[in-house]
Amino acid sequence: MKRLIYILFLIMLIVSCEEIYRPNIDKVDNLLVVEAIFITNKAINSVHLYQTRGFNDANYSYPSVSGATVYLTDDLEASITGTENSEGTYTFDQKLDSDRQYTLNIELDGEIYQSEVQSVPDIPSIDAIYAEYDYSISIDGTASSSDKIEKEYGFQTYADMKSAGETNHFRFFGRKVVQYIDTYDTMVNGIPMTLPIFIWRSIYPNGTFNIAGPPEYSTSKDITKHPLEFFPQNYNKYFPDTLSFAGWIYIIDQYGLNEDTYNYYEKINQQLDNQGKIFDPIYIQLEGNITCKTDPQKKVLGNFEISSYAQSRCFLTYYKNKEEFRIKRINYFYDIPYSGYIKDNMPDFWETLNRTYPTE
C-alpha cells in the first residue's frame, strides 16, 4: 500500500502544472525614445525615434515613430533639418561646425521636444599606448547564488591623454583582431610543398562603456594610465594550439565627449554594474537632456550627444609561456574584414613587427 501511495504521489508530481502569474500592471501611454548621437567629423548622422512598449505587450519590438520634424539649431539661430529616409530614422547629411553649439528639436503630434545645448568637442587623440602584465579578475554571481571568481593572467593595455584643449572626457570602443597561421600540403610544379593559411577573427568588448575623465579633486586635466583592453597570455582560448599565433591588431575607436554626456554614460554604467545584490545602487529611470517644452510633465527618454572621433591602432605580440611582449603603433590603416582566411599570400593588412607601409 505504501508503495502504491508513493507511485500515485510521483504521478501527481509529474502531471501537475504551474500556473503562470501575470501581475496586474497599470497600462501607461508609450513614451517617446530619442536616440541621437552626432559624430562631428562624419558626413552623415541619424536620429532614431521610437516608442516604449508595455511590460505585458505581446509585441517585443519597439514601434518606430514617423511623421516628426527633426532639426538642429545652432547658437546663431541657423537650422539643419533631417530627412526621414526610413520609418523612424531621420538623416542629416551636413557636417557640424566646430565653432558652433547645437540644440536638437523635435516636433511631433503638436508637442515640441528640445534638448539642452551641446558643444562640438575637439578631435581626441591618444598620446601613449602601453601595456603591463597583470591579472584580470571577474566575478560572476547574483543575489541568489554564490560568487564565482575567475582569475586570468595576461597583460592590460593603457592609454595616456594630455589635456590640450576643452575636451577632457572620452569614450573608447576596442576591436581586437587575433592573427594566427595554419599550413597545408600541396604540390607546386610536381614538388611537394607546405604553404601557409593566414587566418584572423575579431573579438569585441561587452559589458559597461569604457569612459575616461579627469581625476576628481585634481587641478590637472591629464588622464594617465587609463585601462583599455585586457589580453590573456593564453591566446589558445581563441584558436587550437596546433596553429601558430601571429599577434594582435588592436583597433581603438576614441570619442571626445561633452561633460554632461560623460555623466550620462557613467549613470548607465552604474545600472549595468548592478547584479541584484543588497548593496547595489537602486535601479532608476535615466534622465537624458531632452524635455517636452509644451508639456513639461510629459516624459521623454533618450539623450542628444555630439561627439568627435579618432581611431588609433597598435600591434601586440608575445609568447604564451614567457613574460615578454612587444607593442608598436600602426600609422597606416587598412580595411580589415570581421574574420576570414587567405591561402599562400599574406593579406595586405597583416601585421608584423618589421613590416613596411605604402608611402603617400
Image: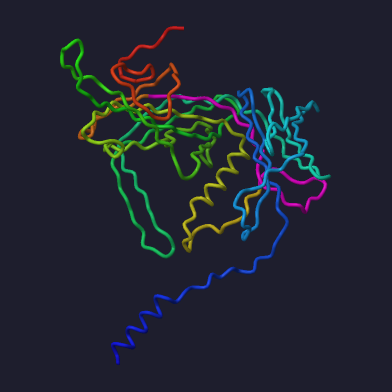
At horizontal 22% and vertical 35% (from top left) the residue drawn is 241
On the image, the x and y values in percent for residue 289 come to: 69, 43
Most common SS among magenta residues? strand
> Left of 7 or right of it: where is 337?
right
On the image, the x and y values in percent for residue 105 come to: 76, 37
Task: Give the quadrant of residue 291.
Answer: top right
On the image, the x and y values in percent for residue 324 come to: 24, 29
Front residue of 106/1: it is 1
Tell me if residue 73 comes above or below residue 349 in the rendering: below
Front residue of 303/204: it is 204
> Left of 180 or right of it: where is 25?
right
Is residue 124 a member of the stretch shown in magenta?
Answer: no
Quadrant in which the N terminus is drawn: bottom left
At horizontal 53% and vertical 70% (from top left) the residue drawn is 20
Is residue 306 a member of the stretch shown in magenta?
Answer: yes
At horizontal 63% and vertical 40% (from top left) the residue drawn is 260
Residue with the most extreme bottom position: 1
Tell me if residue 155 comes above or below residue 341 in the rendering: below
How many numbered discs sit on the rendered protein? 0
> Left of 285 or right of it: where is 200?
left
What kind of colouring is applied to the model shown?
rainbow
What are the residue bounds of the magenta stretch? Answer: 288-314
On the image, the x and y values in percent for residue 18 come to: 49, 73
Residue with the most extreme left position: 191
Tell me if residue 79 comes above or below residue 116 in the rendering: above
Tell me if residue 243 comes above or below residue 302 in the rendering: above
